[in-house]
Amino acid sequence: MQVLGHRGSRVPGPENTSEAVDAALRAGADGIEVDVRRSADGDLVCVHDPRLPGRLTGRAVIRRTTRELTGLGVPTLAEILDAWDGRGRLVLEIKNQPGQPDFDAPRERTARALVELLRSRGLTRTSGGASGAVTVSSFDWFAIEAVRDAGIGVSTAFLTMPRMSVSGGIAYVRSAGHQELHAHISSVLGSPDVPERARAAGVGLVTWTVTSVRDADRLRAAGVDGVICDDPAEVVRGLGRGAA
């Protein structure tokens, strides 16, 4: 079972930063997951919320320039790719949800910008890059379908919300030609046969968000393919795996 750091590593953090990415990978995680949005300039940046928290609230991320955002500690995706540097797996979650300021389905400008960045960095199967290490995920199926249709050879994964039918998610992933379902932990632990159903359908099953070693161990026993963890270092240690 793969251990993937959530937003790089939320513990110790700060999340979605080069430091968090490096900490997770040095601790022995098999890879990391980060969030992707666009700045006002159209650049890709790594930040979870559509607006920055605390005293930095106000204008949405999509209405701030890249220079403003980096000055506030939000890294560009290019910086995150440099920190990752091909070490293990990289899951790029496109944030594009209804009601948020940057929502633009089905135009999918973030997904299309991501395709071009991956091309320019050689992270595609067509360019001979390490595309097998890169997965693009989203709750927005238009986003992952845009990446799938771009023909760059990276894998795609559908994210499902808590309490969403896992059976429906598996059926969609299989019919749409994606590779994985990233299901909420409550849906997986609530249905012990989910991993078996995913395997039978040829769908990889990754579970988010795991916050304890106990849950990680239960999911490993259930047969999931990967877990996205807030504290990947703790999970790596708790599962009896040392850092490489």
Image (cartoon, rainbow, N blue to C red):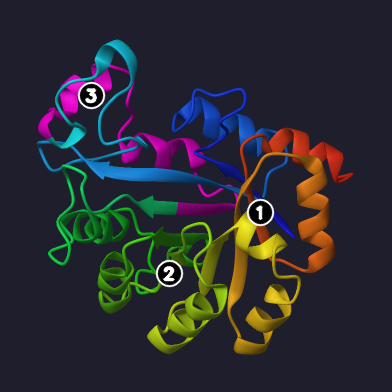
In the picture, the disc for residue 69 is: 3
Q: Is residue 96 above or below residue 157?
A: above
Mark with earlier residue (1, 2):
2
Segment colored magenta: 63-91
Left or right: 93, with 171 as reference point: left
**Labelled pair 3, 2 in contact (Cβ < 8 Å):** no
> Which image quadrant is residue 145 in?
bottom left
Q: Position of residue 68 (x, y in %)?
A: 17, 20
Q: Nearer the viewer, mark 1 or mark 2?
A: 1
Residue under circle 2? 156
Residue 90 within the segment the image draws in magenta? yes
Considering the numbered disc 1 on the image, is that residue within a helix, a strand or a loop?
Answer: strand
Q: Is residue 8 above or below residue 116?
A: above
Residue under circle 1? 227
Residue type pointed to by label 3: Leu
Residue type pointed to by label 2: Thr
Q: Position of residue 21 (x, y in %)?
A: 53, 35
From the viewer's side, name the closer residue of 170 and 113: 170
Which residue shows up at 52% across the image and 50% down it?
Answer: 86
Left or right: 34, with 209 as reference point: left
Mark 3 neighbour density, 10 Å: few (under 14) some (14–19) many (20 or more): many
